Image: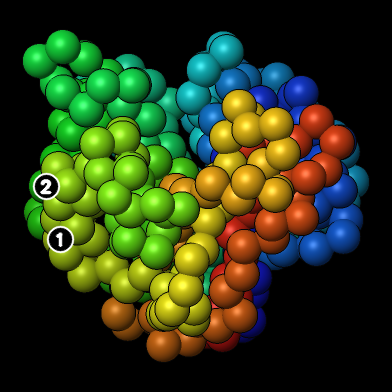
Amino acid sequence: MSFTLATWNINSVRLREPIVCKLLEEEAPDVLCLQECKSPVDKIPMERFHALGYTHMVARGQKGYNGVAILSKIPMIEAGAEDHANLGHARHIAGKLENGVTIHNFYVPAGGDKPDREINEKFGQKLDYLTDMRDAFRADAPEKAILVGDLNIAPREDDVWDHKKLLKIVSHTPVEIEHLAQVQDAGKWVDITRQDIPDGLLYSWWSYRAKDWDEADKGRRLDHVWATPDISASAHSSRVMRAARGWEQPSDHAPVFATFDL
């Protein structure tokens, strides 16, 4: 079975229902993983998604903050939801497809503005969340699995617009990069996007603060698609849909795609 997957931090699924539907209509991924839905599950606008063929959903939500959902055309059952670091946040949901593949959808804490847990509680929460993810994958090694989401870290030098300038900026600090690497190593996860696009600057997020985000192009690759080694070779056609960042009332993130032949 071949299927295409997309991951997108939508920054409010209800506010941006029109562009979610635009993506579903124009790109028609088999599976769409959304983060920062900012909605209780029962308020997610499933009626229009269902009409477009996305008849399966697993989700965790809360009012106004966080929230993750997986929409699928392919039959899918819920496969768990973890509250890493016991934050009480809706930041993870997993779904299992009929071909046996488990998809983990994560929204890792952003971490606030200061990269110092002594003065910034949110940064400590981010590091603790990543540590808990690492320990979970060490304890229960994933197989036939895909991990996607807004991981809120741009790990490589060419994942940011200026490596030196961003070394002390949350999302690209050495301590965050090391924590993310430990998560990746714990699950033996393969970075599918960089497997397909190994070289060159690549971003999935551009700040709302930029007057002309496209021309300034001060981006970061915060959104990721990983897979376990047993299925990573089946992945291809990775891309960041940059154009969606320029849609009407956009998210500050762009969708990231990959296709798997399994």
Disc 2 packing (10 Å; few <14; some 14–19; many ≥20): some
**Which residue is identified by label 1?**
186
Taking the spot 22% from the left edge, 27% from the top edge, the residue there is: 115
Regarding mark 1 in the picture, which secondary structure is present there? helix
Location of residue 24 in the rendering, given as x and y in whole percent from the top left corner: 81, 54
Taking the spot 75% from the left edge, 50% from the top edge, the residue there is: 244
Task: Name the kind of residue labelled 2 in the image.
Answer: Asp
Q: Nearer the viewer, residue 149 or 45?
A: 149
Location of residue 27 in the rendering, given as x and y in whole percent from the top left corner: 80, 63
Location of residue 49 in the rendering, given as x and y in whole percent from the top left corner: 81, 43
**Which residue is identified by label 2?**
135
Q: Across the whole image, how many numbered discs are drawn on residues?
A: 2
Residue 78 as seen in the image, left or right of residue 92? right
Task: Name the kind of residue labelled 1 in the image.
Answer: Ala
Q: Nearer the viewer, residue 132 or 98?
A: 132
Indicate the quadrant containing the N terminus: top left, top right, bottom left or bottom right. Answer: bottom right
* Residue 155 picture quarter: bottom left
**Could one spot residue 68 in this view of the protein?**
yes
Disc on the earlier residue, 2 or 1: 2
Q: CA distance from mark 2 to mark 1?
A: 8 Å
Image vertical order of residue 240 relative to residue 246, above or below: below
Image vertical order of residue 1 relative to residue 67, above or below: below
Location of residue 54 in the rendering, given as x and y in whole percent from the top left corner: 76, 51
* Residue 137 picture quarter: bottom left
Give the numbered dot on residue 1.
Answer: none
